[in-house]
Structure formats: C-alpha cells, structure tokens
Amino acid sequence: MRKPDVKVVILGDMNVGKTSLLHRYTERRFKDTISTVGGAFFLKQWGPYNISIWDTAGREQFHGLGSMYCRGASAVILTYDVTNWQSLSELEQRFLSLTDTAHPDCIYAIVGNKADLTDACAHLVEMDDGHMSEDIQDTPHHPASTTSTSSVLLHKQVDRMDALALYWRILRYKGLEENASPAAERMCFETSAKTGYNVDFLFETLFEMVLPSILKKRNEGDASTVDLEHSTETKRTKAGCCR
Amino acid sequence: MSVKAFELVPTVERELLMGDKPRIAIECVECCGQHLYVGTNDCFIHHFLLEERTSNKGHPTFSAQKLLQRYLGLKKPVAELKAASALERLVVLCDGVIVVVDMVTLEVVPTGGVKIKGAAAFCVNENPVNDDPFGVEIGVILARKRAVHIYMVYEDRVALVKEVATPEPPCALGLDGCFLCLALSSQYVILNYGTGSSQDLFPYNSEERKPIVKRIGREEFLLAAPGGLGMFASAEGISQRAPVKWSESVIGAAVCFPYVLALDEGFVTVHSMLDQQLKQTLSFRDGLILQDFEGKVVLSSSKEVYVLVPLPLERQIQDLLAGRRVEEALTLTEGARRNIPKDKFQILRKRILQQAGFIQFGQLQFLEAKEHFRKGQLDVRELISLYPLLLPASSSFTRCHPPLHEFADLNHLAQGDQEKVARCKRFLISYLNEVRSTEGTNGFLEDVDTALLKLYAEADHDSLLDLLASDNACLLADSAPWLEKYHKYFALGLLYHYNGQDAAALQLWVKVVNGDLQDPTRSDLFEYVVDFLSFCSNMDLVWKYSDWALQRDQRIGVQIFTKRPVDGELRGQINPENVVTYLQKHCEALLIYLEHLVLDRRIQKEKFHTHLAVLYTDRVLALLSQPSAAEETVSRPRCQLQRLLKESSLYRVQLVLGKMESSGQLLLERAILHGRLEEHEKALNILVHQLKDFPAAEEYCTWASASEDPTYRRRLFHLLLGTYLDPDVPGGGNTVAAVDLLNQHAAMFDPVKVLHLLPEGWSLQLIRPFLSGAVRGSAHAMRTSQVALGLACSENLQLQHDRMRYRGGPVFVSEKKGCHLCHNTFSEPDCVCLPGGVAVHTHCATQRLRNSPTKRWTDNGNSHT
Ligand SMILES: Nc1nc2c(ncn2[C@@H]2O[C@H](COP(=O)(O)OP(=O)(O)OP(=O)(O)O)[C@@H](O)[C@H]2O)c(=O)[nH]1
Ligand SMILES: [Mg+2]
C-alpha cells in the first residue's frame, strides 16, 4: 500500500453531499450514494504526491469516530448544504471540535454544496475540453423540491457571508491570526457535486495549499520514524495565538 | 461479488470432545502449530494433534487426534488459554486466576510465588519491546480495577513488570510493543506504557456492546466501533484504512491477510483489508469463538471446532480472474507483496498482470489491456500467437503453460464477429508499433516485425512501406509468400532489396511494370525502378536492366546514367565513354546523356562537346529538312545548338562548320562558328548581307568581344559599320542600319575615324545624336581632366605649405601612437606625414593615393557627367 503524504478530511452533516463531492472529483460523475457508514477513503495521486482523502459519515451514530479521522489532518473540508441552514450551524456545534486532533498547520475550507439548487450559474458544467456547457439532465434532487424544472430554484438558506463569518469564528476558535491564515474569501467555496461546479477547483486549491506541509513532511523523512512517540505527545498541544 | 477465500473444515467433532457428557461446552481455544488446546466449562483442558490433509478432490481436511485432557481442579470454566510456545507453557485464565501449565503434560507449573488473582482477561504481547527469549509478556486486566498489569511469564516463575493506571476500568485489551490498546467502559484508548502517554481513540459503550480489541499487525489494532463497524487504529491513533462494515452483533474478529473475518450470531463475514469490501459470507450458527493463530483461523461453537482454511492466494486470484474481476484480482495481488518472497511475488504479479491484460483484451478494452501487458512485461509473442499465421514458421515460440487466457485464437475470441477481429488487428498494429519503438521486444524483433508486416499487408496499411524502408527485422522467407498473397510486389521488392537481393527485387518490379503482375502501390513504378538503378551499385544489374528501361522510355531510362551520383564511392562509377558507346543505338538517350555531361557536369572534353554539337546540328538539320516542321519545333533545338556553339569553346569548329556548309543552311550558326575562328568579317558578312539580321550582328559584336578588351570590341563595331557601308554590295550599303548603329552605340566609335568613313552625302541631321554625343563626350573628358588638374595643383600647393610649416618641427611617432588611416600602431620609424602633420604608415598613404579621386578620374575617362 502506498503511504499517503498528507491527509484531507471531509466533515459535515449527513446528506450534505460529502460522498458525492468526492465521487465527482475522483470519478468525474454524479451518482447515487447511500449514506456513508463509518468512513471511506481514497488515495489520490497528485503529481508525485499521494494524498489520502477521507470521506466521513455524517450520521450522528458515527460522530465519535471523527476525531480519529481528523488526527494529523493537513486540511479539513467542512461541508454544508446551501439549502439547509441547520447544516451550517451543525458544523460549528458538532464538527468543529472534532478537528482539535488535526495537524497544527491544518487549513480549513468551508464548502456550501448543492449550489445547483439555488444558483443558475452553478448549472454550468465544465466539460473535459475546458468549455462550459449547461447541465442537461438537470432535475433538482431535493426532498423539498416538487417541481422538476431547472428554472425553479430553491431558496438559498445560507449566504456566502454566513460562511465567511463562520470561517472567522473558526480562526478565533483555533486561536489563529486572521492575517497569518489563508483569507476567508479563498477558503469559502460554493460547489455542486451534481454539476461539478467548483469541485475540481476546491480540491486542487486545497492540494496546492497543503503542498508546503507535504514538503515539510517529506523533508522530515527519516527523522519522523524516530520521533513517533514525541509526536503523540505533542498532538494535544493547541496552536498558540502568535504562532 | 463473492470470492471463495476460506473453506470451513470441521476439525474436532462433537463426539471426540465430549463423548457422552452433553453438558460440556467449549469456552476457549488455542492453536499452536499442530497442537490444538480446548478449554471447557467443566474446567478441563483438552489437547489435540491436528493433521492437515488434502482430499483427493483437492479440499483440505483435518483429522484431530486427542492426546490428553486434564482437569484444572477449580470447578469453573476455563476462560482463556494462550500458548507461550517458546517456553512450552500455556497461560490459562480460570476463575479469575492465571495459572501456567506445561504444554505437553498439561500439569500446572509453579509461578514462583506470584499469584495473579481477580483477572478478567489477559493477552500476550506478540511484539514485545524487551525481546527476552526466556520470557513472554502478558497484559492482565483485573476485574473492576482501573489498571492493567504487565507481567513477564518465565518457565518457572511470573514477575510483575508494570502497573499501568487507566482512567476507567478496562474490559478488553490488546498489546503490541509498548502500546496497550484498551476498551474502557465508554471509549477506546491507546496507552504507551513506556512513556505513560495516552491517546483517545473514539467513544464506545462497552456495557452496551461487547468491545473487540484485535491486534492485526505492528502497532495496528482492529476495534469494534459503533454502528457495527470494524475500525482500524494505529498506535498513533490514526486510521490508515477505511473501516469495514460488520453487523451490530459481532462477537469476534480475526485477521488472515489480506482479510478481516468477523463472527456474529449467524455468519462469518470476510472483508478485504485492501478495499474494505465484503468478499465472502459463511453461514455459521451458534458461533462462539473466532480467532487466528499464525495464519490459521479457528472457529468454534460450544461443541465443535472448525478451521477456516484460506485458499491459496493464487487460487483466489485465479478465481477472481475467472470471474473477470480484474481490479480485485490485481488489488489482491498487490496486497500479497509483503507476504510472498520478493522474486516469487514478481513472477506472480507479472503473470496476473498478463492474465488481466488478456481478459481486458478479450473485452476489447485495449487501453487497459495494453497497460497491463506493459506492466506485466508480456512476451509480445503471446499476443501475436493469438492471431493465426502471424508468427513466422521459424519462430521457436510456444505459449506459456498454464495458458494466460482461454482463447484458442482470434477467431475463437471474436466468435465470427469480423468487426471485432478488425479492431483486435488494429490494436495489435498499434501495440507492436509501440513495442518496437520502446525496445520492449525482448529480442524477438524478427517475430514482431514479421507480424507487423503481415498485418500491414493484409490491412493495406500505408506504413508497410515505412516499415520496409526503415531498419527492420522482417523475415524474408516468411514474409515473401504473404506479400505475394496480398499482391504487395512493390513491398516485396523493398524487402528483397533490404535483404541484399536486388536482382530479385528488380525482376519482380519489372514484371509489375510490364503488367505481368498487378500491384497498384506505385503508379510511377517505372520511374522508381530507373531511380533505383541509378543508385544501384551492382553494375551487372544496371547493364542488364538499362536496355529494358531505354526501350520503354529513353528520356526516363537515361536517368539511370544521368542521375547516378558522381561523387559517390568508386564502386558503381561508370566511365562516361562507355555509356556514350553503349547509348549509340538510343539516340535520344545519347543526346540527353551528352547534354548531361557537357551542360550539367561541365566535363571539359572535346570529344563530348564535338559529339553534342554534331548531334544538335544533325537534329536541327533533320527538322529543317522536314517541310512540315513548324517554326516552334525547330526553334528550341536551334537555340540549344546556338547556345552550345557560343558557350563551349572545346568542340571542333571546322568539323561542325564543314557539316553546316555542306548543308547550305544554318547561317546564323555558321556566323557563330566563324566568330569562334575569329573570322569576324565572314561572320558579319553572313549576318548583314545574307541574313540581314542587324540586331544579331550587333549582338555578335558584343558576344565575340565579351572576353576581350574594349579596343577589341571597338574594332568589331568599326568592322560592322564598315560592313554596313560596304559599297561593293549589290543594292548599296545599309545606311539606316549604320545610322542606328552609330547613334545607339556612340561610345563604341572613334568619332574622327567615323567621320572619315562616312559618305560625303550624308546629312548632318542624320547622325546628330552620334555627333552631339561624341562632342559632349570629348567636352566632358576635357573638363574632368581640368578639374583633376586643378585638384592636383591645389593638393600639391597644400603639401608645399605643410612642408614649409613643419620643416624643422618634429613629427612624433611611437608604438603607442596610431596611424590615422588604419588605426594600427607604428612598428617602424618610417612614416608619411599627411597635410596637417598627421603621421600615417607609408603603405596606408600609398593606398590612399591609389584611391584618391584624381587617380580615379584618369581611369574612368569614359564616364560622362
Ligand atoms: N442537487 C444536488 N444534490 C446533491 C448534491 N450533492 C449531493 N446531493 C444529493 O444529496 C444526497 C446526499 O448525498 P451524499 O453525498 O450521500 O451525502 P453525504 O454528505 O455523504 O451523507 P452521509 O454519508 O450520510 O454523511 C444524495 O441524494 C445526493 O444525490 C449536489 O451538489 N446537488
Ligand atoms: Mg457519505
């Protein structure tokens, strides 16, 4: 088994589309999913690097496993559903604390999925040849939706501003300086696993941003095998505010 | 979806264990090599010897032979049994007490005074850090105590090593290195008993559900998690594999690489650790214990013991392949990397990759197939051999055994679907091409190239010719009949040529050109053959086929000789004289060849020049003698003749002239010949009086004097003027021509001489342009010389002046000082002082003087201002 260089974890309430996002990115299509059991992971070969992407289960039942998945993560994708305000607030209530075990240099992205349901622009699918085209078989798959015409958009419950505000609160929670961390505007995404809108962009942006962590880890190389025990100890120390 | 990974084999049957005591139930088992120990609820330990056999159907069977049974004397069930085989001891938990018994006699051995009481569970560290060969480390949980005790068990004693406090009372444990993995009442944790650090894993309610802690390898544990999951956790508290999905009621788990087995009330499930998928489900009621012992998985109910025998990995992989589950087979193969010796693994992997490739090939998934063939380093001949008749008869290849695929050949694979066959062939073409270019042929280049040639020929593929024209290893003997079959005679010729059999190639091509064989590959095959002959170094062949070529078309055929590279190696050089002699009977070719020698190669040999001149002359004369010949058809050959006569100076003039004079024609040409003999008067006479072609006459003057000095030319022009004005000619002189000549070429004439020559009666007006030109010319000459004179005088004066000024004053010359004209330094004291006291080299001064305007004027006295 190839050893991953870094870990990226997708968190979020059930049904927000975590699995669908990962599918869209790795298999380039949108397909039926079943609610994830436990967790799943995918090893992505990104250039010379191996990145493991963990898809977690949003169901309450598996909530306890979250910190273990997040342990040592270099990036966490906090996912909500733009048509569901509750899913955003769950991120703060339930999921944020799971990331305490993440790597001190971990970066956080806030992703509003299912943008296709609320924004016409998210219907534009980037084709493989780089052109944009209108998504064809386009029927909003949402419990609340009774119509099947693409022109009827759902109410967007979560604004981009709400996501930005959450991001700032996360920084505060982590004790991170705003100007020493990636800007909120860069870290808040709206995506659609269904049409593929912004999905590649999301993952590629994050990979670019964790690259320093990868290189750092690779440089530590042999040293890390010796340091295993120390690293378990330092795991729990939280990043100080003037890091 | 399923694979058969394990076979359930009954091992200890009901009767063997309990005989006639129906209340006996199994509590725990231990297996150590061939030795199976069973602990029962009546406080007995039973010892069996297992013998593994293979039935004649290939199924594994076990026969168990009961060796011994011993009562421990505690009246309580034997709760746990663990072997410490290095010490020949069994560690037994019974009634909360840990006792040590001899593995052979099952007698309790003393523990050196240390009594372990109140134990709830224990485990053996299979990967101890202390590495003491005489002791075995065990971890013990005490009932309702918030601690784990680590003991060392020796042959004759037990010693407490450490007491590790835990936040809650533990209820299950695993031990690896110095990591203790514990199920506490509300969560799992990992403790490092060396450093004392702890790591929370995840919450789990151990009161609600039985926790499972199963060490699966170095610093990795498998844990029962909420929702019926099997979670993997490393000692660092990280999950490196995705969880497997068990049922909520799982009671036991075991690992047998690459599988995780779990037991619940009704089933044993088998998941792969490689892709987390469920691979096999065995129905099993009343299961109690599922444990692995050094690769053996033991499953037991309360009455019977079974062994789950893993099918050999290769067999499993083959089963997967047989079910066309290529991806899974490959994953399983890769997963086996650690479990199989390296070289053996490489062989296995290659083979599986090749088989996978063939499966995908059979499904026409060529891209994937190619990738697997490449990775598996497939002997390309395996693939070629699928296509009937492609491998050369001489090939030593035999398919590998056991076969890599189920196909007899392509027809079998395609089941008569011609479209499929065609696609497979296209694939093979591209594959072989790639193999060729990447040197992946493992030395079977002949087989590959021959196969490729056959495919190309059959498919009428353009690349056939490219293949043959480049370096190739096509086998002639095998390819020739094939190419003939597909009428690829041109290609066959190329192959003959490549194999050094030019004679065969030519013979074949000639037949095609002659129409005896049909091959439309090249419509210009004749030209090709001629070209081929022109480069052919085998002179016998050249002479053999040149007759044929010349008879077919002299103009093209002669290229055999004219296109032949001149400056090549000596071999294949032809003496032109021989060619000329040879071409005697092909006059058109001969003419072209001579033109080639004289005009293109500029061979300076009188013989060729004269020969060509004579042939040209003959040709023109022949044309002229045909009354029907049109002006245009004659004019070109005449031009060629004239050009030769004018430009060459080597031919024998008298001979050609004689030929022309006897014909009484070709006056212009005769004039040229006279000119060659410097008989200008005769020439001009012909031109002026016989031909009356005045432009030609003037042109003659220019031509005949082209390489002479200006006075020669003037002489000719005067001669021409004289000819024009010749009064002896009947009809009088050509006054008009003379006037035009004078007026247009005024510079060619000496005005004074001309005035003497002109008849008295001419009007001045007639030659006004000439005269005014002459007058202006002389005036110009006078003035320029006056200017030059003036300039020279003033320069002289200036020099005089300077000389006066500098007389006595020194002119400094040193190595550091540069000459003002050439800017080089002085190396000698000699110098010239220019006006102004500027020192220059003597040679620079001379140079300057030579180029000075005064000097130039005197040279170009003719130019007008
Ligand atoms: N319209 C729309 N529907 C989506 C999108 N992404 C996911 N869905 C749908 O939302 C539902 C849940 O998707 P999943 O990807 O299974 O959600 P999840 O976050 O993995 O859920 P859990 O595994 O239970 O945590 C499915 O019915 C998807 O079809 C999206 O971008 N647009
Ligand atoms: Mg999911």
Image (tube, coloured by chain):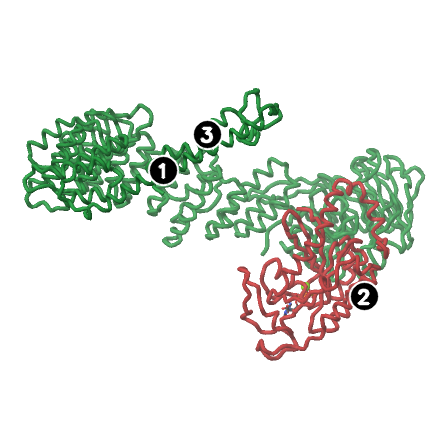
In the image, are marks 1 and 2 on the same chain?
Answer: no
For label 2, count other residues whose C-alpha is less than 10 Å away and answer few (under 14), some (14-19) or many (20+). Answer: some
The image quadrant in which ligand 2 is located: bottom right
Q: Is residue B381 rendered to the left or right of residue A16? A: left
Rendered green, the chain in question is B
Say which amino acid is labelled 1. Answer: Ala
Say which amino acid is labelled 3. Answer: Leu
- Residue at 27% x, 43% y is B773
Which chain does the residue under circle 1 lie in? B
Which disc is residue B491 wearing?
none
The residue carrying mark 2 is: A169
Say which amino acid is labelled 2. Answer: Arg
Q: Secondary structure at mark 3?
A: helix
The colour applied to the residues of chain A in this rendering is red
Q: Is residue B775 rendered to the left or right of residue A86? A: left
Which disc is residue B849 wearing?
3
Q: Secondary structure at mark 1?
A: helix
Which disc is residue B469 wearing?
1
- Residue at 20% x, 25% y is B606
Q: Position of residue B860 (x, y in %)?
A: 35, 35
